[in-house]
Amino acid sequence: MPDQITITRPDDWHLHLRDGAALAAVLPHSARQFARAIVMPNLRPPVVSVEQALAYRQRIVDALPAGPRFEPLMTLYLTDTTSPAEMKRARDAGILAIKLYPAGATTHSDAGVTDLKRVGGVLEAAEREGIALLVHGEVTDPEVDVFDREAVFIERHLIGLRRSFPGLKIVLEHITTKDGAQYVAEGGEKTGATITAHHLLYNRNALFRGGIRPHWYCLPILKRELHRVALVKAATSGSGRFFLGTDSAPHAAALKENACGCAGCYTAFHALELYAEAFDAAGALDRLEAFASVDGAAFYGLPRNAGTLTLEKRTWTVPETLPFGDGELRPLGGGQQLSWAIAAPTDAERSRP
Ligand code: DOR
Ligand code: ZN
C-alpha cells in the first residue's frame, strides 16, 4: 500500500462559499486544495442574474489568499421568473450552470422553483446555450418520507426532465442513494452526479451516535448503509460520470446546535483527506485522481488542471473549531483522527501558474 499519492490538482464541483466574513473564513481552505470550484448561488438574496454572479465572483477573487491559483466557476439560481434570455448572457459571461432548488427543499431555497412547468423556456435556452442544469434532487412534498425524497424526485421529475431536454447537461448533485447512483450510471453521457465525502464515509447512524449530532445533518440527509455502499461503488467504479463535489456548507456552530439546526456539513477544511479516507477504505486509492481531478472537468468540457497535490499517510487530528466571522465553525468530525494528510507543496509545485 502506498504511503503517498500524487494526483493532478483537483476541483470541487459543488461548493458553498457564502459571502462577507464567512467567505473570507472558508475560502482559504478550498483554495489550498482545489484549483477550481463550482460556487453555489444560494446567498441571501440569491444570485439570480449574470450581473450578480459576476459581482459575487469578484468578491471571491478579492478574498483569495496568496497562494496557488483558484478559479471560482459561477452559477445562477433558477427561479420561477428567470428569463430564458439570461441563458445567452450567462454563456457569454462564462457562467457554467444554473442551479435548480425545488422551493423549500433546503437552506435558502425559498426562492426556488415551485413547478418545473414554469421553467421550461429557460431549460430549453440552457440546453441551446450549453449551460448545465445542476439539480438539488429532492421532492418537497411533506407526505414523502425525508429518507425517500431523492428516489421520489427521480421518479416524479428527473426522468421527465431528462426526456424533455435530451441535449441538456444535467448533474444530480450530492447523490445519496443507490437509486441516484443507478439512475446516473444508466443515464447516458449528458447525465452526471457529484458525491460528497460525508455521504461516502457515513450512514444515517452518524446522526444519532450517543445523542443527536447536528453537525452530521445535511440535505439530502445521510441514508442507510446500503446506500453509502452503493455510493462508494459508484465513486470508485471508473465511470466518468461520478465526480467530486463536497457540498461543503458552512454554518455558524450556534445555528447548527439549535432547536431548529441548519442543514450543511463543513468539509472544505479537510475535503481531500476525507475523500482519501473513503477511497482507501474501499481499496481504491488508484481511482481517486479520476474522481477528483479528471472526470468532472471532462464532463464540463474544461481542461485538466496543471499542477499536482500530494497526500501522505500521516495521522492527524481534525480541529474541533475554526474561526468563522464573529462565531465559530465546527468541521465535520472535529477531534477525530484522519490517516491521510495533504503534504506541503514542493517549491516546483508552488511556482507553477
Ligand atoms: O445541507 C445542505 N446545506 N444542503 C443544501 O442543499 C444546501 C446547503 C447549504 O447551503 O447550507
Ligand atoms: Zn449544496
Image (tube, rainbow, N blue to C red):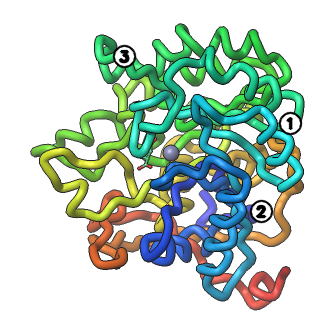
Horizontal relation, residue 350 to residue 56: left or right: right
How many badges with numbers are in the image? 3
Figure quadrant of residue 251: bottom left
Residue at 66% from the left image edge and 46% from the top image edge:
76
Circles 3 and 2 in contact, beta carbons < 8 Å: no
User: Which residue is the site of mark 2?
Assistant: 8
- Residue type highlighted by circle 3: Asp
User: Which residue is the site of mark 3?
Assistant: 141
Image position of 2 with respect to 205: above or below: below
Q: How far apart are marks 2 and 1 (CA)?
A: 26 Å
The x, y position of residue 127, in whole percent, is 83, 28
- Residue type highlighted by circle 1: Gly
The x, y position of residue 146, in whole percent, is 32, 23
Image position of 239 with respect to 291: above or below: above
- Residue type highlighted by circle 2: Thr
Horizontal relation, residue 151 to residue 81: left or right: left
Residue at 57% from the left image edge and 68% from the top image edge:
30
Q: Distance between the residues labelled 3 and 1?
A: 31 Å
Of label 2 and label 1, which has the lower sequence position? 2
Horizontal relation, residue 211 to residue 290: left or right: left
User: Which residue is the site of mark 1?
Assistant: 130
Circle 2 packing at 10 Å, graded few (<14), some (14-19), many (20+), is: some
